[in-house]
């Protein structure tokens, strides 16, 4: 059962009324939930509620709270992904898996070897946000990631909003991601950006641009050459393994 986001305005003591159109449609029409069934709800304060459906009318669902707890389904670290846009199915997978892995935000990158036209990316931002939102519901995350507007590599690497930037550059660097994470000093509240290139890799111009930036750690993910979507999962998973609190 996916969880559904509500606000504290929907709560009256131990009664929660679900009137949001999207939630109502999903629960009543898609899942065809019935009176007496259990739902999982979560509010903006990350309080998760297990509720029982008491009634369903034409536009709302009334539920009664069985129990509640503070959700811990969110990362302690602030992890962001900047990734060269892939073809449709692969890109949808990246959005879904990055969300499941807890990233706070996803930056679609337009790179020299990007296979998707820049104009097409603009029209896909809303769809990618919806994919991220659905993934949040399925994995019971306590927060939503944001899919940002497109940017290019030059603008992103010059963005001063991040404390640490790690670029995965296969074939060209000897520093492994594991060694990088264990050698640099990463404060608990650091904003970490992971940069992943396209299937064809970064262009020579982009590699030169990365090499000129002293504040970007250029790492390899190992001896194997990975597909871009696999590299995203590999990099994020290993960073979480190394840095996330026990």
Image (cartoon, rainbow, N blue to C red):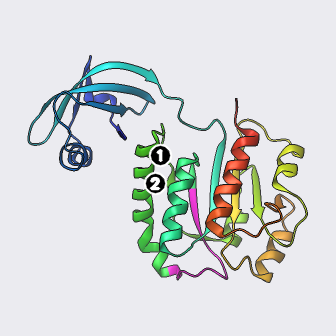
What range is drawn magenta here? Answer: 106-118
Residue at the image point whose x is 24% and y is 43% from the top:
27
Q: Is residue 57 magenta?
A: no
Residue 22 position, x and y percent, is: 25, 49
Q: Residue at x 69, y 43 (%)?
A: 240
Residue 77 visible? The answer is yes
Q: CA distance from mark 2 to mark 1?
A: 8 Å
Residue 70 vs residue 211, the one in the foreground: 70
The image quadrant where one finds the N terminus is: top left
Q: Is residue 65 left or right of residue 186?
A: left
Is 235 on the left or on the right of 27, as rendered? right
Q: Residue at x 12, y 42 (%)?
A: 59
**Residue 10 in the image: above or below residue 140:** above
The mark closer to the camera, 2 or 1, is: 2
**Residue denoted by label 1:** 144
Q: Is residue 110 magenta?
A: yes
Quarter holding the C terminus? top right
Q: Which mark is residue 59?
A: none
- Quarter-of-image position of residue 64: top left
Task: Classify mark 1: residues with Cα within 10 Å, few (<14), some (14-19) or many (20+).
Answer: many
Q: Is 10 rendered above or below residue 144?
A: above
Residue beneath disc 2: 132
**Residue 37 horizontal/vertical position (percent):** 23, 30
Across and down, in percent, residue 116 comes to 54, 80
Q: Are marks 2 and 1 in contact (CB under 8 Å)?
A: yes
| Secondary element at image label 1 | loop
């Amino acid at each position: 059962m996916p969880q559904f986001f509500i606000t504290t305005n929907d709560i009256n003591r131990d009664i929660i009324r679900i009137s949001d159109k999207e939630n109502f449609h999903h629960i009543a029409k898609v899942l065809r939930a019935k009176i007496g069934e259990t739902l999982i709800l979560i509010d903006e304060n990350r309080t998760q509620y297990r509720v029982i459906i008491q009634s369903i009318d034409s536009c709302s669902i009334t539920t009664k709270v069985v129990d509640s707890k503070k959700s811990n389904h969110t990362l302690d670290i602030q992890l962001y992904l900047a990734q060269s846009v892939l073809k449709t199915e692969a890109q949808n997978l990246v959005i879904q898996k990055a969300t499941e892995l807890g990233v706070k935000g996803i930056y679609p990158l337009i790179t020299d070897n990007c296979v998707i036209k820049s104009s097409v990316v603009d029209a896909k931002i809303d769809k990618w946000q919806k994919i991220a939102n659905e993934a949040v519901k399925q994995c019971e995350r306590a927060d939503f990631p944001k899919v940002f507007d497109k940017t290019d590599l030059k603008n992103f690497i010059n963005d001063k909003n991040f404390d640490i930037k790690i670029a995965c550059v296969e074939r060209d660097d000897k520093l492994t991601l594991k060694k990088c994470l264990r050698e640099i000093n990463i404060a608990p509240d650091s904003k970490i950006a992971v940069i992943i290139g396209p299937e064809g890799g970064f262009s020579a111009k982009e590699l030169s641009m990365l090499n000129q930036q002293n504040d970007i750690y250029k790492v390899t993910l190992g001896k194997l050459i990975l597909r871009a979507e696999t590299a995203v999962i590999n990099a994020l998973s290993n960073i979480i393994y190394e840095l996330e609190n026990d």
